Image: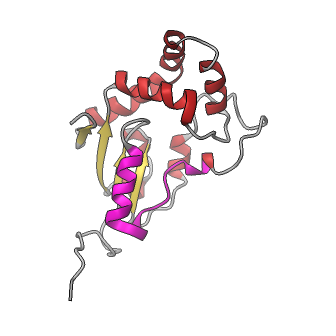
Amino acid sequence: LRMPIRLPWQKRADHPALVHITHIKAGSTWIDGLLRRLFGKQVMPRFGSGLFKTQFTEAAGESQRHPPYGEMFRAMDYRPGAVYPALFITYDEFTSHAEFRDAQRFVVIRDLRDTLTSHYFSLKGTHALDNLGRVKTAREHLQNVGKDEGLLFLFERDLDRLVQIQRSWLAAGALVLRYED
């Protein structure tokens, strides 16, 4: 008989959760797939996936500069022993949810130049639409301007959030892995 390999936190409610923290375009889909193969049903739904589950409507909050990641995270249920993939949150947002403070965690960041370049091509042509209208608005803009103007648009719209996430985890002294490595 083959005994399945079980890591310490697997199928044990007395162990803390495992949390993957990152930002856009830093391999989150790839890591999500790895976590699902390793931990199966213990892996929770992707953070923020609800933003993509309904069809976009013009009435959806297009005026919102960024999705309310901190609010969505604080509303999440904590399940000991669960695996949480791809949380796009800062250190302060993470520590605002007291139940998660003892969770095992790892952070993956990517060079911001590569992040914005990948983000540009994804938004311009392939990324799924969200129900806040951010992708649709960006795609329409990016398809009507040159690459330099498009990259500047994303730089002005999204760079601050990426920098906040990276700086907060680096300053916190967390285990930070670089996508390029």
Q: Most extreme residue toward the right, as rendered?
A: 59
Image quadrant holding the C terminus, namely top left
Q: Is residue 54 magenta?
A: no
> x and y percent of residue 16 in the render?
32, 64
> x and y percent of residue 59 in the render?
79, 36
Judge by depth and name the residue closer to the eye, 152 or 68: 152
Image quadrant holding the N terminus, namely bottom left
Q: Residue at x 56, y 26 (%)?
A: 124
Q: Residue at x 49, y 50 (%)?
A: 47
Q: Is residue 48 magenta?
A: yes
Q: How are the colours assigned in the image?
A: secondary structure
Judge by depth and name the residue closer to the eye, 49 or 170: 49
Judge by depth and name the residue closer to the eye, 85 or 81: 85
From what the image shows, is residue 147 above or below residue 104? Answer: above
From what the image shows, is residue 40 above or below residue 152? Answer: below
* Res. 8 image quadrant: bottom left
Report whether residue 18 is seen.
no
* Res. 174 image quadrant: top left
> x and y percent of residue 101 in the render?
35, 53
Chief secondary structure of the magenta portion: helix
From what the image shows, is residue 53 above or below residue 38? Answer: above
Q: Residues in magenta?
A: 28-51
Q: Residue at x 25, y 33 (%)?
A: 180
Q: Is residue 69 left or right of residue 37?
A: right
Q: Residue at x 66, y 23 (%)?
A: 140
Q: Most extreme residue toward the bottom, as rendered?
A: 1
